[in-house]
């Protein structure tokens, strides 16, 4: 019996690598109307597993759980 590989396995492997290595996503959004900038939004998110985040000194508290 040979193991099969589906797209679902690829997603699991991608999530495993992202949580193990970590990734930072940054986006700058400007909402304009009639070529007039109205709102500017700057977003940054760090996604990583708990072990990787603790390596970089991120303090994690689970109060209320």
Image (cartoon, rainbow, N blue to C red):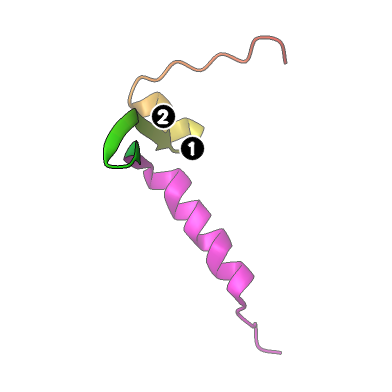
User: Residue drawn 54% across and 68% down?
Assistant: 10
Task: Give the residues in magenta.
Answer: 1-28
Quadrant for the C terminus in the image: top right
Q: Residues within 10 Å of mark 1 (few under 14, many from 20)?
A: some
Q: Residues within 10 Å of mark 2 (few under 14, many from 20)?
A: some
In front of the other: 3 or 40: 40
Q: CA distance from mark 1 to mark 2?
A: 6 Å
In this picture, is 16 found above or below 3? above
Expressed as whole percent of the image width and height from the top left, the position of residue 1 reads 71, 90
Residue farthest toward the top in the current orientation of the protein: 63
Expressed as whole percent of the image width and height from the top left, the position of residue 47 reads 44, 38
Expressed as whole percent of the image width and height from the top left, the position of residue 25 reads 36, 42
User: Residue drawn 43% across and 45% down?
Assistant: 20
Q: Secondary structure at mark 1?
A: loop
Q: How many marks?
A: 2
The answer to which image quadrant residue 28 occupies is: top left
Residue farthest toward the front in the current orientation of the protein: 34
Residue 32 on the magenta segment: no
Residue 14 on the magenta segment: yes
Q: Secondary structure at mark 2?
A: helix
The reply to whether callout 1 and callout 2 are in contact (CB within 8 Å) is yes
The answer to which image quadrant residue 12 occupies is: bottom right
Q: Which residue is mark 2?
A: 53
Residue farthest toward the bottom in the current orientation of the protein: 1
In this picture, is 8 found above or below 46? below
In front of the other: 49 or 30: 30
User: Residue drawn 40% across and 34% down?
Assistant: 45
The answer to which image quadrant residue 34 occupies is: top left
User: Residue drawn 50% across and 53% down?
Assistant: 16
Is 18 placed left or right of 2 in the picture?
left
Q: Which mark is residue 49?
A: 1
Q: Which mark is residue 14?
A: none
């Amino acid at each position: 019996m040979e193991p099969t590989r589906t797209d679902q396995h690829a997603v699991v492997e991608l999530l495993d690598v992202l949580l193990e290595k970590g990734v930072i996503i940054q986006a700058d959004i400007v909402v304009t109307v009639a070529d007039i900038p109205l709102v500017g939004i700057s977003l940054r998110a760090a996604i990583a597993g708990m072990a990787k985040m603790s390596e970089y000194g991120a303090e994690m508290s689970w109060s209320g759980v």
